[in-house]
Image (spheres, grey):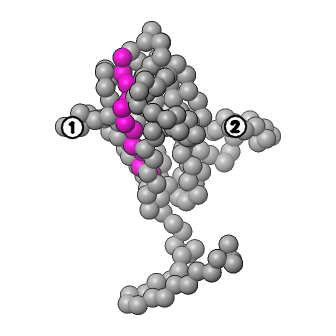
Amino acid sequence: GRLEYRPRFSDGSYRAGIVAEHNTAVTGDVLVVADREKPGTITFDVGCPYVLTACEFTMHLTGGDGVRMWLRVHDEHTVAPGEQDRQMPELAHEWTELQLQRQPDGCLTATADDEINGCFHGYEMRLQLVGDTAIQALHLVSHFQLNRYALPHLLPGHNAVHVAAEHF
């Protein structure tokens, strides 16, 4: 399956999907660096109840192209055991910088197949913007796989599947 996320910067609803934001602002419907003398960073949290197999990122920029991207998969083991009661514990995995590729239409893309494959707990994606770089549109696609043992056993031909809401 696919989980797609296209944050809307214009109404501020994108903030529900972030865990950290520093020196960024929204002008109209574009995410910009608030103080161009310092880098701006924003970290999105992508949770998924299924096994992730790959992810793709697409950005449409205005202004410059001073943008970098990192990925960190969530891990069930924290760096500081015993501090599980904290809202967002430090995670054991380190950040991996992803290489952005310029496409013929001008957008920047990145993929993370090896970095994300087999991840059970989601991931975080951090963007760093510098100077007059601004993000007009962002599209995150996470690919996941359902556990085949949890699904109905379907055979070639006609299959009837019944779902009863009282069991949920």
Residue 55 in sight from this viewpoint? no
Question: For the stretch drawn in magenta, what is the main secondary structure?
Answer: strand
**Alpha carbon separation for disc pair 2 and 1:** 39 Å
Q: Residue furthest bottom?
A: 158
Query: Residue 33 in the image: x percent, y percent?
Result: 45, 19
Query: Residue 88 in the image: x percent, y percent?
Result: 68, 37
Q: Is residue 82 left or right of residue 47?
A: right
Instruction: Say which label, 2 or 1, has the lower sequence index.
Output: 2
Query: Residue 32 in the image: x percent, y percent?
Result: 42, 22
Per the image, is 136 magenta?
A: yes
Q: Residue furthest top?
A: 37
Residue range in magenta is 132-142
Residue under pointer 2:
89
Q: Please name the residue shown 37% across and 25% down the image.
A: 134
Say which quadrant the N terminus sits in: bottom left
Q: Residues within 10 Å of mark 2 (few under 14, many from 20)?
A: some
- Callout 1: SS: loop
Q: Residues within 10 Å of mark 1 (few under 14, many from 20)?
A: few
Marks 2,1: beta carbons within 8 A: no
The quadrant in which residue 20 appears is top right
Query: Residue 137 in the image: x percent, y percent?
Result: 37, 36
Per the image, is 73 magenta?
A: no
Q: Nearer the viewer, mark 2 or mark 1?
A: 1
Above-or-below relation of 21 to 11: above
Q: Please name the residue shown 66% across and 48% down the image.
A: 76
Viewer-proximal residue among 74 and 129: 129
Residue under pointer 1:
105
Above-or-below relation of 156 to 55: below
Q: Please name the residue shown 48% across and 16% down the image.
A: 34
